[in-house]
Amino acid sequence: MTVIIRRLLSTDAGVAGLVLRVPVGTILFAHGAQKLFGWFGGYGLDGTARWMASVGIEPAYLMALMAGSAEFFGGLGLILGLLTRPAAAVGAFTMLVGLAVVHLGNGFFLADNGIEYALALFAATTALAIQGGGALSADGIIGPRD
């Protein structure tokens, strides 16, 4: 296995990786499904693009597609624990952009659409990018053994 693939699949987490990645992955997956497909009461890709354009995120359709895909596929990767580190890194970047562009001007608390929720997801995805998916993950099964 090449060094890059070994590093992507390696994990420093035990069961804690599972405890963190399944709920975070589920949240990201559901939000991505809202953006891409309109599932779970979402607006779908067109509606998400219109909203993004309304808050000044351009090119809106591309940004909606990228954010929705990062959340949907990254969330699925986190749930399975497959390529956890890159999935989590993409999720962290997506949360950081949302935090800075959408939520920062609204203060801290979620009730005011502030940074609280995006910050929590950013912290969780960053931790997963650092530690990997854990022993009970697809990465832990197919990844390197020390």
Image (cartoon, rainbow, N blue to C red):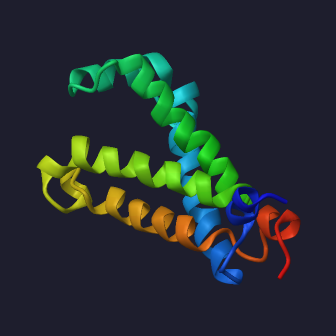
Q: Which of 37 and 67 is in front in this view?
A: 67
Residue 73 shows in the view: yes
**How many numbered marks have been drawn onto this rendered protein structure?**
0
Residue 26 shows in the view: no
Above-or-below relation of 29 to 35: below
Above-or-below relation of 145 to 69: below
Quadrant for the N terminus in the image: bottom right
Q: Which of 39 and 134 is in front in this view?
A: 134
Q: In which quarter of the image is residue 108?
A: bottom left
- Residue drawn at point x = 79 percent, y = 58 percent: 2
x then y, percent, for residue 120: 38, 65
- Residue drawn at point x = 55 percent, y = 64 percent: 129
Quadrant for the C terminus in the image: bottom right
Q: In this view, does 60 lie to the left or right of 124?
A: left
Q: Is residue 136 left or right of residue 56?
A: right
x then y, percent, for residue 34: 52, 34
Q: Nearer the viewer, residue 144 or 42?
A: 144
- Residue drawn at point x = 44 percent, y = 55 percent: 92
Q: In which quarter of the image is residue 14?
A: bottom right
x then y, percent, for residue 119: 33, 62
x then y, percent, for residue 139: 78, 64
Q: Nearer the viewer, residue 84 or 117?
A: 84
- Residue drawn at point x = 66 percent, y = 59 percent: 84
Above-or-below relation of 10 to 146: above
